[in-house]
Amino acid sequence: MIGWSKAGRFAVVGFGALGVLVGIISCGGSASVAQGPAVTKASLGKALFFDKTLSNPPGMSCATCHSPTKAFTDPRPGSPTSQGVIPGLFGFRKAPSIMYMAFSPEFAAGTGEGGTSATGGQFWDGRAADLPAQAKFPLVNPIEMNNTNLDAVVATVKKGPEAAALKLLYGANIFDDPTAAINAIVDAMATFERTPAISPFSSKYDAFLAGKAQLTAAELRGLAAFNGKGGCSGCHDSSPLADGTPPLFTNFCYANLGLPKNPANPYYRIPAKYNPLGSAFIDIGLQVATGNPADAGNFMTPPLRNVALKGPYFHNGIFNTLSEVVNFYNTRDLGGFGPPEVPQTMDTTELGNLQLTSQEQADIVTFLGTLTDGYTPTPSFIRRSP
């Protein structure tokens, strides 16, 4: 279990709707960490995470695609995948949530089922081994934050409001070595992402496990179907870990669920300079990280915590509602969906014809709603609890 050091916590004003810590700076823009009551690596990382000057041109921060208002996913409506700082340029995937990703182990290829897949890492395809490595990719992606290189990011931070804090925490001469400076920048961001602000474990289900809440009849039926007939818990374990960590609802493994291409994906229509294949583009997923054709079409199994807030769903944003997602798992093999984007590695054993009733599907969706952080037990229940 990840330990939360005293130095890594925020001095804060209060809690937001997700149970996410609120303070130091708002989602609306960047601000110097000097405005906060204490300078820590976590507070510096938070300031950098919300700093809109770190894109080229300025105007986009990490929080643009990972907003605390939407479980640290992309809050902008109208597109199944995420737009970068250049208007009209979209990536081919939806920005995943960063919540609870601090618990993902370092990427390791060949460690999944059958030895052909992988576990851990970051992104839908595992191409970043850990949180600090992940933070570097969007900064220099031309259809995300569009910096020429990481040295350009360092130059921006050096002249910005976080420079003094970076020197204080990482050494007065940190900017003398651009490599050391960028490593310090992403280390601070990763420190913020490891705080309880990003992994609060404050859902109704957590309260239920702690004996501080009772699930409704529909929620209990959904939990039973989730663990039983639906087989969801095979990849999204609903039980606490052996070390006492609350359930993460993921095994951080990779799978090809047989998802169709999403014809509404705007990436297919961006200029050929960025996508020369147009609508013929195939997203090979994990194969990007491993180079193994057996991994084509495999994508990380994300944590289901706060899943009710994370739509649209899956890496290409093909479904808008959880009801559609559960129906796909249940009936994929019965028709009504497009052909799988990568058919040769599709999982044909664990989903596709689960024979869930419409009531069981609805109950699973209801149960998934109990995984949203920010739940407050009723005063009467708190008084009854030991």
Image (cartoon, rainbow, N blue to C red):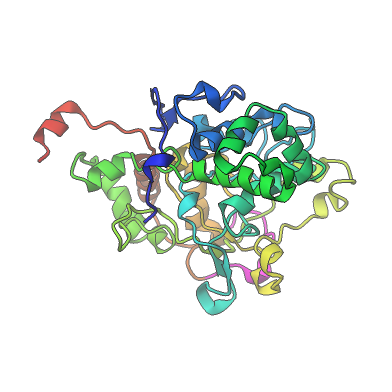
Q: Is residue 82 above or below residue 125?
A: above
What secondary structure prevails in the magenta region? Answer: loop
Q: Is residue 378 magenta?
A: no
Residue at point 33%, 54% (across, down): 245
**Residue 123 in view here:** no
Residue at point 28%, 31% (across, down): 376
- Seen from the viewer's position, the closer of residues 211 and 164 is 164
Q: Is residue 310 above or below residue 304?
A: above
Looking at the image, residue 80 sits to the left or right of residue 274; the answer is left
Residue at point 85%, 46% (across, down): 274
Residue sitting at the far front = 172
Place of residue 120 in the rendered image (x, y in percent of width and height, measured from the top left): 53, 62
Quarter holding the C terminus?
top left
Looking at the image, residue 373 sits to the left or right of residue 137; the answer is left
Can you tell which quarter of the image residue 176 is in?
A: top right
- Seen from the viewer's position, the closer of residues 142 and 381 is 142
Residue at point 69%, 59% (across, down): 341
Q: Is residue 17 above or below residue 95?
A: above
Looking at the image, residue 247 sits to the left or right of residue 310; the answer is left
Place of residue 95 in the rendered image (x, y in percent of width and height, measured from the top left): 62, 43
- Magenta part of the protein: which range? 335-348
